[in-house]
Image: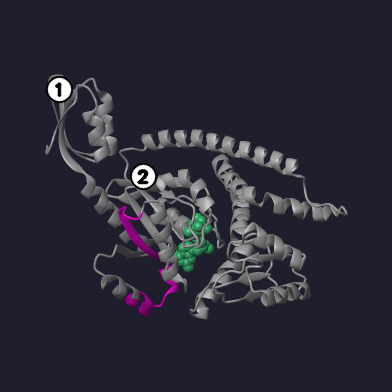
Amino acid sequence: MLVGTPRGPGGGEEAGEDLRELARLTDTAGGVVVGEVIQRIRAPGSRYYLGKGKASELRDLARERDAELIIFDDDLTPAQGNNLEKLCGVRVMDRTELILDIFATRARTYEARMQVELAQLQYLLPRLRRMWVHLSRIRGGIGFRGPGETQLETDRRLIGTRIAELRRKLKTVARSRATQRKRREGHFRAALVGYTNAGKSSLLEALSDSPQFVEDRLFATLDPSTRCARLGDGHEALVTDTVGFIRKLPHGLIASFRSTLEEAREADVLLHVVDASHPDRDRQREVVRGVLDDLGLVDRPRILVFNKIDLLTGDDILSLRKRMSERPGERTALYTSALAPSTVEPLRSELRTRIRARLQRIRVEFPVASGRVLSALYENGEVLSRSQDGALVSVVAKAPPALVGWLRARGGVRVVEPG
Ligand SMILES: Nc1nc2c(ncn2[C@@H]2O[C@H](COP(=O)(O)OP(=O)(O)OP(=O)(O)O)[C@@H](O)[C@H]2O)c(=O)[nH]1
Ligand SMILES: [Mg+2]
């Protein structure tokens, strides 16, 4: 049974869309929705979140429909959750808990699993008493009033220890990730970000010709994967897929996925993928902007990619294009369908342009014995000419900033610019 509690005045449309999304999340978690309750509230009640009358209504409807679980679209305090469970006699969870549950079933890599466990434990800690009450009710001991304070203290301490351990391990993984990234320095890097189900993985597949896990469910991707995209004219970019964003994304979860999102932080450009066919498109764009802001990424170079245009009519596309072009200072906007390779071409071309713009023309002189220098120039730059005078090689090339930095830091190498 789903419960939506839109705040203040406003169209019923958003509230309906919110509940549709909660229904999709429920489906992703393996649940079946048997009913919905919506109450527009000004402020949440401290006891049941809902008003007293509505809460009783919820209890009755849940009984009538045989609901085994009630899911609130908004975060409940431990007390509210507890009171509601007492009132309705079934398990009550909120959106955060549902998302954590989905993440837990979907996390595949060691790192993603640890990140999810960390978020779950952080969520659990303040709710420990309620969870215990839940358990004790199942055991049903008469006069059983929950665990003694000592038991709670022990559990808190154990969880605290585990949290510290997870943090430490995640730090180690983050360090090795950073070394991996170092190796990629010199390459142009793009990161796909966007609302869940927008088509990020599908676009990565289209750009790189390598199959990705794509599914018409929320949070198909939890682990970032990086692929090389051939852009034509000998240009390449490393493109990283990242975890999708969602409205009311649990803060603990963002924090624990921070290291995965580091990939996005170090990208030369962010590809903000928008499902252009979604009725809630504009609000989803805003949500992503908000999360990027939280992550300190909002001012990074960013391209808006309106995807799934195959689902739009010609008129829809025209009016979208018109709207985008009328906004000065708006980001570069492109229109793609991950299902039609020809529509991805403008994205390739935009990336090529950005790669070229980043290249610096330099002349490099180095001893012929420094084979690494020459291969680095060929691999990560564009060699324009090359000559040799005795044991000294001289190359004119176009190079990305990271390569220029690397060359400057090498002994015996002289960099002259513009070359
Ligand atoms: N019609 C159409 N469907 C698309 C397009 N791109 C992706 N899809 C579908 O949209 C659904 C989600 O695609 P994904 O690529 O998994 O989306 P994602 O952004 O990676 O989603 P998460 O990993 O869950 O955040 C899948 O069913 C895709 O087949 C498109 O351009 N047109
Ligand atoms: Mg994906």
Q: Residue at x 25, y 65 (%)?
A: 329
Q: Tell me where residue 65 sits by quadrant.
A: bottom right
Q: Earlier in the sequence, mark 2 or mark 1?
A: 2
In the rendered image, the vertical position of residue 114 relative to residue 354, given as above or below? above
Judged left or right of residue 387, residue 316 is right
Who is closer to the viewer here, 391 or 363?
363
Q: Residue at x 58, y 65 (%)?
A: 74
Residue 316 sits inside the magenta stretch: yes
Q: Quadrant of residue 319?
A: bottom left
Residue at numbered disc 2 = 266
* Residue 337 shows in this picture: no
With 163 as the anchor, is 186 left or right in this view?
left
Q: Tell me if I can see residue 233 in this picture.
A: yes
Report the amino acid beneath label 2.
Glu
Q: For mark 1, does the 10 Å Cα neighbourhood hold few (<14), some (14 to 19), or many (20 or more) residues?
A: few
Q: Residue at x 30, y 70 (%)?
A: 324
Q: Position of residue 271 (x, y in %)?
A: 37, 56
Q: Position of residue 55 (x, y in %)?
A: 69, 73
The image's mark for residue 392 is: 1
Q: How many residues crowd around disc 2 within 10 Å: few (fewer than 14), some, or many (20 or more)?
A: some
Range of the magenta residues? 298-319
The label on residue 342 is none
Question: Which is more toward the observer, 49 or 182?
Answer: 49
Q: Quadrant of residue 378?
A: top left
**Mark 2 and mark 1: span between their CA atoms?**
35 Å
Return the x and y of residue 152 as percentages of the image width and height: 71, 44
Position of residue 138 in the picture relative to residue 415 (left or right): right
